[in-house]
Amino acid sequence: MVTYKEGILKLNSQTDILDIVWNVCFFMRLLSIVCFGNVPSLYYASFFILLGVSLAEAIVKGKFSTKIFVPLHTIWYGLFIVLGVVSSIWADVFSRSFGPISKMIQILVVSYCLIIHIDSYEKLESYITSSIIASFVLVVYIFALTPSSMWFSGFLGSVTSYNTNDIGCAVSIAVIFSYYKAFIKHKKYMYALCAIFFFVAILTSSRKALFMSVLGIVMITMFNFRAKNYVLRLMVVFALMALVILMIYEIPALYNTVGVRLDSIIEYIMEDKSADSSMAIRQYFIDMAKMFYYENPVFGIGLNNFAYRLSLYDGMVSYAHNNYCEIAADLGTIGLIMYYWFYLYIAIKLVAQIINGHKTALVFSAMMLLFLIFEYGMVNYYKEQVHIVITAAFIAICLNDKAHNEKSNLTELQL
């Protein structure tokens, strides 16, 4: 516990010091994967420091005193990595199968660090807060390094050296987390942060970020059916989302940023397949991935080999822009099942926990459903910022199950 009395700040236990150190290390890790893509030294340093601090904390707290804890999440993603490595045996190009393995191993390690550290609701809420603060630093960093004349030119965020779609994903996650803090945890000042993140999501020109932000807010509001004035709250949220869309179309700066892209996708779907070149080329990659899958439906063509097989057909080198199709082409039906059963497991568990009144299930069920929807247009199986959220969702399930069991046991004792 941290206390402040008579001008003196006191740390009352060694455990608290370790918690603070861990939070700082994890915060730096978050910054390295969403903001400072042009500082590779921070990326690797934050990984090894977080690993070291997590192991030290686990040893001090006696978490490894009897046996090493291997959670279901680690088994799931670890086996998926093993499948990727084994796929090199039948891959078109042996070496390409190892391309994303380094990132995947880092995801496995960082996820394990989260699981052994976050053992209470307080620490889970601390993770959400750290994610929001890291995203706010990202926003400040982007606006500080981007000339004001470029703020409304579209695709904001390139100064980070990360793809603007990745920036859009990070900001949309921050939108959902800050809305959860404001709407569910009643921290009203978070509404201001939510609005800022939403505004930045629009400026990235990422349609996925915009739709994820809108749907995330709507889902949390809909899932919170126990709230007072539920119907009224839902109507207000729908009205606000409609206002956002209206502003995008009525304010020229916003329309030029993302409105034109919304129009192009509507025209692409409804009338002209040439109206949106981005959608057309993405659909081409998806179609090619489906073709490779049909040629090797059981085991695929080897992890990370889609781009190589595509280059043999037309000289282009790209990923499939679709997580389902990328995994299907590379690892076949086996890979799809091995990867997505865990998504479905988490989503189903969280929906059940919403019914039981667990607040954290509200935000993480929305996150998992959004990933299931929008991975049709993004490749996430090796994206750390996404997998940290998935790990947190798994932790929320474990904490909620533990709380439910303790409540049931207490009820039985009272009876």
Image (cartoon, rainbow, N blue to C red):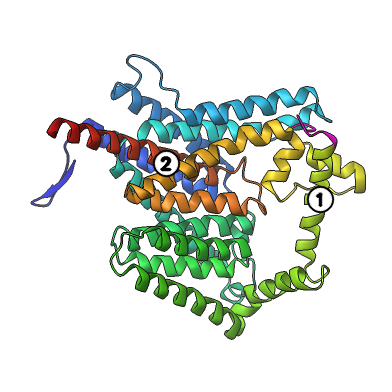
The magenta span reads 295-303
**Residue 254 in the figure: left or right of residue 193:** right
| Residue located 63% across and 74% down the image | 257
> Circle 2 sits on which residue?
26
Labels 1 and 2: the sequence-earlier one: 2
In this rendering, which labeled residue sits more in front, label 1 or label 2? 1
Query: Mark number for residue 196?
Result: none
In the rendered picture of this protein, how many numbered marks are placed on residues?
2
Towards the viewer: 258 or 239: 239
- The residue at the point 60 percent across, 82 percent down is 249
Quadrant occupied by the C terminus: top left
In the picture of the structure, the residue carrying the numbered disc 1 is 287
Image point (62%, 79%), residue name: 255
Q: What residue type is labelled 2?
A: Phe
Residue at the (41%, 33%) spot, across then down: 115
For the residue marked with disc 1, what is the amino acid?
A: Asp
Q: For mark 2, does the 10 Å Cα neighbourhood hold few (<14), some (14 to 19), or many (20 or more) residues?
A: many
Tell me where residue 16 sits by quadrant: top left
Comparing 47 with 40, the one in front is 47
- Residue 311 lies left or right of residue 166; in this view the side is right
Residue 111, image x, y percentages:
48, 35
